[in-house]
């Protein structure tokens, strides 16, 4: 376990709820990149797989938490982008 890895994931874990809140409150995805979110999500999945197969520790939970937040952000993107196209 690296304290720096945990610190990075904690900072990201604090930041993602703000991005989710902004999209949910505005109900607008202008300026949101689904490709960026998808790549970040894949990065968290890769981190989880590494922890699972090579060095399982509590940091796995931070990866899982962050992946869940990014997934939520992506779901909101698809919901609100579909609504914008329907108008």
Image (spheres, rainbow, N blue to C red):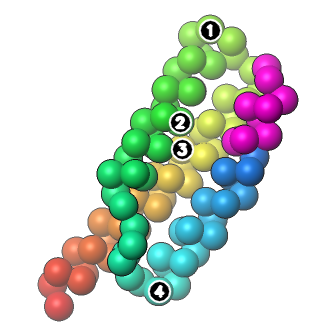
Classify residue 82 as left or right of residue 79.
left
Disc 4/disc 2 C-alpha distance (Å): 26 Å
Q: What element carries label 2?
A: helix
Q: Measured from the top left, where is residue 43 in percent x and y?
A: 49, 34
Q: Name the residue under label 3.
A: 67
Q: What is the magenta range?
A: 1-9
- Asked if the residue under mark 2 is in contact with the one under mark 4, i.e. CB atoms within 8 Å, the reply is no
x and y percentages locating residue 2 in the rendered image: 80, 23
Nearest to N terminus: mark 1 or mark 2: 2
Assign a secondary structure to mark 3: helix
Place residue 7 in its image quadrant: top right
Q: Which of marks 2 and 3 is nearer the N terminus?
A: 2
Give the mark, 3 or 1, whose residue is nearer the N terminus: 1
Residues tagged 2 and 3 counted as in contact (Cβ below 8 A): yes
Tell me which numbered mark, 4 or 1, is placed earlier along the sequence.
4
Q: Residue 44 carries which label?
A: 2
At x 63% / y 65%, what residue is drawn?
A: 17
Disc number placed over residue 46 in the picture, else none: none
- Is the residue marked by circle 2 packed among few (<14), some (14-19), or many (20+) residues within 10 Å? many
For this view, does 48 lie left or right of residue 81?
Answer: right
Residue at position x 84%, y 29% from top? 3
- Residue 54's label in the rendered image is 1
Above or below 46: residue 15: below
Q: Which mark is residue 26?
A: 4
Distance in Å between CA atoms under marks 3 and 1: 19 Å
How busy is the neighbourhood of tag 1: few (under 14 within 10 Å), some, or many (20 plus)? Answer: few
| Separation of marks 4 and 1 at Cα, in angstroms | 41 Å
Q: Residue furthest left?
A: 86
Question: Label 4 neighbourhood size at 10 Å, few (<14), some (14-19), many (20+)?
Answer: few
């Amino acid at each position: 376990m690296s304290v720096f890895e945990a610190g990075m994931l904690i900072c990201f874990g604090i930041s993602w709820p703000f991005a989710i809140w902004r999209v949910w409150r505005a109900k607008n995805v202008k300026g949101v990149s689904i490709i960026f979110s998808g790549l970040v999500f894949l990065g968290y999945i890769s981190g989880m797989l590494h922890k699972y197969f090579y060095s399982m520790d509590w940091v796995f939970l931070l990866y899982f938490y962050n992946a869940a937040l990014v997934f939520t952000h992506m779901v909101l993107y698809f919901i609100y982008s579909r609504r914008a196209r329907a108008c």
